[in-house]
Amino acid sequence: MTFREGFKEYRIILLLGLFTLLTASFFSIGYNNPDEHWQILEFAHAKVNPSLEKDLPWEYKAQIRQAIQPVMAFCLEKCLLAMGCFSPFLMTFILRLISGLLSFVAIH
């Protein structure tokens, strides 16, 4: 096998993996654990709508949870609101897509 043939196969595998990632991001429904929404999306949404802070768990007030994922979700929510196309379904799709692409790049 020549280098060119090996590179072609490698590219096909990468494209197949990327297609699988995009398909899984689009068709995924549900969640693995309620904390995915409660500890990330709800924390981010509370920054957009501060009146919801009273309904959050004690971890929010104690500030003991990491902040990187809620900050990413907050920034995405603000961008979607600014564009006038906010939807929780679109938001979770984009977050799944970003997470998948970051893991794809890390694996590559």
Image (tube, rainbow, N blue to C red):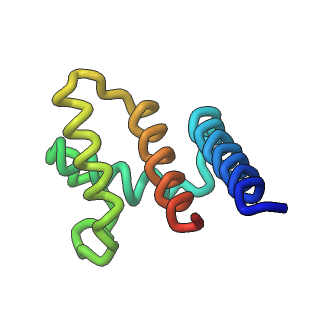
The part of the image, by quadrant, that contains residue 108 is: bottom right
Q: Is residue 66 above or below residue 2?
A: below
- Give 80 or 45, whichever is nearer the viewer: 80
How far from the left and from the top, in percent, is residue 41? 37, 50
Taking the spot 28% from the left edge, 43% from the top edge, the residue there is: 76
- Give 83 or 29, whichever is nearer the viewer: 83
Q: Is residue 3 left or right of residue 99?
A: right
How far from the left and from the top, in percent, is residue 87? 37, 28
Taking the spot 75% from the left edge, 59% from the top edge, the residue there is: 6
Count how many numbered circles sit on residues in the image. Answer: 0
Taking the spot 71% from the left edge, 50% from the top edge, the residue there is: 8
How far from the left and from the top, in percent, is residue 89? 45, 31
The part of the image, by quadrant, that contains residue 84 is: top left
Q: Is residue 13 above or below residue 67?
A: above
Q: Is residue 41 left or right of residue 101?
A: left
Q: Is residue 34 left or right of residue 46?
A: right
- Give 94 or 6, whichever is nearer the viewer: 6
The quarter of the picture where the N terminus appears is: bottom right
- Give 82 or 37, whichever is nearer the viewer: 82
Q: Is residue 29 left or right of residue 56?
A: right
Query: Residue pushed farthest top?
Result: 84
Taking the spot 33% from the left edge, 73% from the top edge, the residue there is: 65
How far from the left and from the top, in percent, is residue 66? 33, 72
